[in-house]
Image: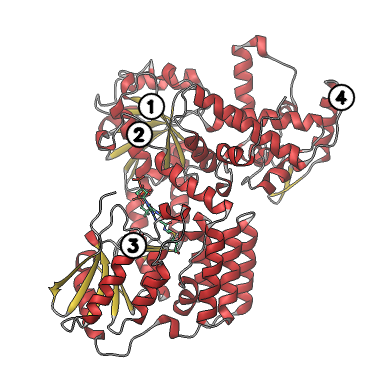
């Protein structure tokens, strides 16, 4: 990586030393940056012409935290605690001028400064838990001396960054300015502090709070953590810091940080971090080849289409929603607006931002209205004939420069492309439900999809804050192909002796967001049933007697939406259903299967075994380019626990073999 180290200039603002961190791509606190920061602080403190210091990043940025690449090696001195100690102990005031982002160690460093000035575009956060670690340089005891402990807990346990306005509101930063004025304003603030007693956060008392409120939040986070150690440890660390001295808490969190840094979970999460960042890389495809998209059309206003339209609006695209009737459009519009308002509430958007988003939505019942869109995404009913009819009708309306994408989950992209005017401008953009929540988008390259089309699909998905994973064509692409095999295996385990709740419990205990039967109930059993019937009609030679899943559908048990499926639901709470047990036992008997006790270990072993064997098949067919792409997709598309790295990584580390029959 090429970089210029920390640069110091004392000429921009008389009497103020500006320490500029210049370490692309994200100003991570690598050894060189840490060393250089200490040298610069020391030098400026010795310089009689300097009265105060400002730390900032090039191009209006700040610091995105520790250098994650260093974490697989030994600790290198000076560490971040040394940098932070040098800043906090500086006899001359040090002001953090925070633009773009202060994350992890960058946020810890800002808290050690004597004042924090932020640009209005800045984000502030502690994402350490998502890397299996916790703030390890005094960030926790400083944070609870700057903001209310329950807010501090939320920040470090969720890992989610907050914006500058929220940071100002809660007391994390002292002032906000437009980013163009950031350094100038920070220099003025620094000058005003010169010669004054310095405000060190570590010397303040912990912000007073209601202990019962804190305890309730702590319990909620610990429960939510499931198997993720970093979240449990960070909750304990905040709790301990509330009553410990600053120094005790700083030393304890350092110790916890070092233990976590070397843990298997942290290694797996670091692997995931880089897996996610390489998943959109495709040999021979460069992001500079991507076309510019301004306006997107989404055809189909059902759950998926509305979800995709909402995601486009959140990313500030002009978005056209097309559906067959004014009534269905009205329903879709209501769904989109409700969902946007929900996001706005949880992310504390301004009314202006919400209104801006909603105003970018247009609707139509006429396919001709897509003519000024650079990208058209079809998200209609999952049926090849229906999709082909729509795609062939678009030939007359879509601009020749535009791209067409399908959101199909299983259908053959090449087959669908064949009815379009220019199959090289056709690709798959497979979003996962709910589209507003799920990060994964499989970007599917057909046989003749052009490099330009693929590059645009990847960049477009990234611009939606999604995780694009490039895949080739096969039934179900990466995630649904693995899911089909995994479901079949778990249904086999069911007949051999386990019950849905035992299988789901075992896999949820392992860390899956939801077990396979709970997931099926959530998605709706009728969708997979329709697909099975379609396949049986297409390939009658493979048709078999109805499975338990078929029987459930025949009984109208389609999952959560009908309040019964693999489970029954009372007020949304899932409960095992003896009627389902009866169906399973009956089906096993009919097939001559003698049921036996099946251990949790066997359930998990067989589940991971089939995921890995399907993953290997996907690799050998060239559908995925790398094992790490499969892992990134499974974590973000199927709720595989990130802290286990993904099925391929987990199997390699733990020696899981395919135990399926
Ligand atoms: N260390 C090393 N490399 C990093 C990095 C980091 N902290 N953060 C990002 N990078 C690299 C990425 O791997 C990528 O490299 P590549 O181009 O070779 O693939 C490049 O920087 C750009 O990253 P993104 O593609 O993610 O760029 P975006 O613009 O989409 O996002 C970001 C930028 C928001 C900073 C995002 O990269 C991010 O969230 N980074 C991680 C931040 C983080 O977790 N910081 C905390 C680290 S732990 C810590 O500080 C511990 C402390 O308490 C001691």
**Cβ–Cβ under 8 Å for marks 2 and 1:** yes
Mark 3 or mark 2: name the one nearer the start of the chain.
3
Decide if residue 446 is on the left or right side of residue 237. Answer: left
Local crowd at mark 2 within 10 Å, few (<14), some, or many (≥20)?
many
Q: Quadrant of the C terminus?
A: top right
**Residue at the spot 55% in from the left edge and 44% down from the top edge:** 645
Write down the residue under mark 2: 457
C-alpha gap between disc 4 and disc 1 = 46 Å
**Residue at the spot 58% in from the left edge and 81% down from the top edge:** 243
C-alpha gap between disc 3 and disc 4 = 63 Å
C-alpha gap between disc 3 and disc 1 = 37 Å
Mark 2 or mark 1: name the one nearer the start of the chain.
1
Q: Is mark 2 within 8 Å of ligand 1?
A: no
Q: Nearer the viewer, mark 3 or mark 2?
A: 3
Nearer to us in this view, 50 or 222 = 50
**Cβ–Cβ under 8 Å for marks 3 and 4:** no
Scheme of image coloration: secondary structure
Mark 4 or mark 1: name the one nearer the start of the chain.
1
Which numbered dot is residue 235? none
Write down the residue under mark 4: 589
Q: Is mark 1 within 8 Å of ligand 1?
A: no
Write down the residue under mark 1: 427
C-alpha gap between disc 3 and disc 2 = 30 Å
Nearer to us in this view, 380 or 651 = 651
**Residue at the spot 85% in from the left edge and 21% down from the top edge:** 590
Which numbered dot is residue 63? 3
In terms of secondary structure, where does tag 2 sit? helix
Q: Position of residue 615 (x, y in %)?
A: 56, 30
Residue sitting at the far top: 541
**Residue at the spot 64% in from the left edge and 70% down from the top edge:** 216
């Amino acid at each position: 990586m090429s970089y210029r180290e920390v640069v110091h200039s004392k000429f921009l603002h008389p009497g103020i030393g500006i320490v500029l961190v210049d370490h692309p791509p994200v100003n991570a606190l690598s050894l060189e940056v840490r060393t250089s920061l200490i040298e610069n602080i020391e030098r400026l403190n010795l310089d009689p012409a300097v009265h105060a210091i400002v730390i900032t990043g090039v191009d209006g940025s700040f610091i995105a935290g520790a250098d994650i690449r260093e974490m697989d090696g030994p600790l290198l001195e000076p560490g971040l605690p040394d940098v932070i100690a040098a800043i906090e102990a500086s006899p001359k005031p040090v002001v953090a001028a925070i633009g773009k982002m202060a994350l992890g160690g960058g946020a810890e460093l800002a808290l050690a400064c004597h004042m924090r000035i932020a640009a209005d575009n800045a984000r502030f956060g502690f994402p350490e838990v998502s890397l299996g670690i916790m703030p390890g340089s005094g960030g926790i005891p400083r944070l609870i001396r700057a903001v209310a402990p329950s807010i501090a807990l939320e920040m470090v346990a969720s890992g989610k960054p907050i914006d500058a306005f929220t940071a100002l509101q809660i007391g994390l930063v002292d002032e906000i300015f437009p980013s163009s004025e950031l350094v100038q304003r920070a220099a003025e603030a620094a000058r005003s502090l010169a010669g004054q007693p310095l405000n060190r956060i570590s010397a303040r008392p912990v912000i007073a709070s209601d202990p019962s409120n804190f305890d309730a939040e702590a319990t909620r986070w610990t429960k939510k953590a499931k198997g993720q150690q970093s979240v449990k440890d960070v909750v304990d660390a905040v709790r301990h810091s509330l009553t410990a001295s600053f120094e005790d808490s700083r030393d304890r969190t350092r110790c916890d940080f070092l233990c976590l840094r070397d843990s298997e979970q942290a290694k797996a999460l670091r692997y995931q971090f880089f897996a996610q960042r390489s998943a959109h890389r495709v040999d021979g495809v460069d992001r500079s080849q991507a076309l510019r998209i301004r306006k997107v059309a989404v055809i189909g206003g059902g759950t998926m289409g509305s979800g995709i339209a909402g995601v486009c609006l959140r990313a500030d695209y002009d978005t056209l929603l097309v559906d067959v009737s004014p009534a269905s459009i009205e329903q879709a519009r209501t769904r989109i607006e409700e969902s946007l308002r929900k996001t706005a509430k949880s992310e504390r958007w301004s009314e202006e931002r919400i209104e801006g988003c909603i105003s970018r939505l247009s609707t139509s019942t006429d396919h001709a209205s897509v003519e000024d869109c650079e990208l058209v995404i079809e998200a209609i009913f999952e049926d090849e004939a229906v999709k082909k009819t729509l795609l062939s009708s678009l030939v007359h309306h879509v601009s020749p420069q535009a791209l067409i994408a399908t959101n199909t989950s299983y259908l053959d992209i090449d087959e669908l492309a064949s009815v379009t005017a220019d199959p090289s401008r056709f690709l798959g953009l497979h979003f996962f439900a709910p589209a507003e929540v799920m990060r994964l988008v499989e970007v599917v390259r057909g046989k003749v999809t052009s490099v330009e089309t693929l590059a645009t699909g990847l960049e477009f998905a990234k611009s939606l804050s999604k995780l694009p994973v490039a895949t080739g064509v096969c039934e179900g692409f990466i995630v649904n192909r693995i899911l089909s095999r995994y479901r079949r295996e778990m249904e086999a385990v069911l007949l051999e002796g386990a019950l849905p709740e035992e299988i789901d419990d075992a896999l949820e205990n392992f860390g899956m967001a939801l077990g396979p039967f709970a997931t099926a109930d959530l998605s709706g059993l009728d969708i997979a049933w329709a697909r099975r019937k379609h396949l049986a009609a297409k390939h009658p030679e493979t048709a078999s007697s109805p499975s338990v899943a078929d029987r459930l559908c025949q009984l109208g048990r389609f999952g959560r939406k009908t309040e019964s499926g693999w489970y029954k639901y009372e007020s949304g709470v899932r409960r095992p259903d003896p009627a389902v047990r009866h169906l399973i036992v009956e089906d096993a008997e009919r097939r001559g299967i003698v049921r036996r006790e099946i251990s949790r270990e066997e359930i998990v072993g067989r589940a991971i075994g089939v995921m890995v064997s399907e993953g290997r098949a996907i690799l050998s067919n060239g559908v995925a380019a790398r094992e790490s792409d499969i892992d990134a997709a499974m974590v973000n598309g199927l709720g595989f626990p990130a802290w286990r790295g993904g099925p391929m990584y987990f199997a390699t580390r733990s020696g899981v073999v395919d135990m399926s029959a």
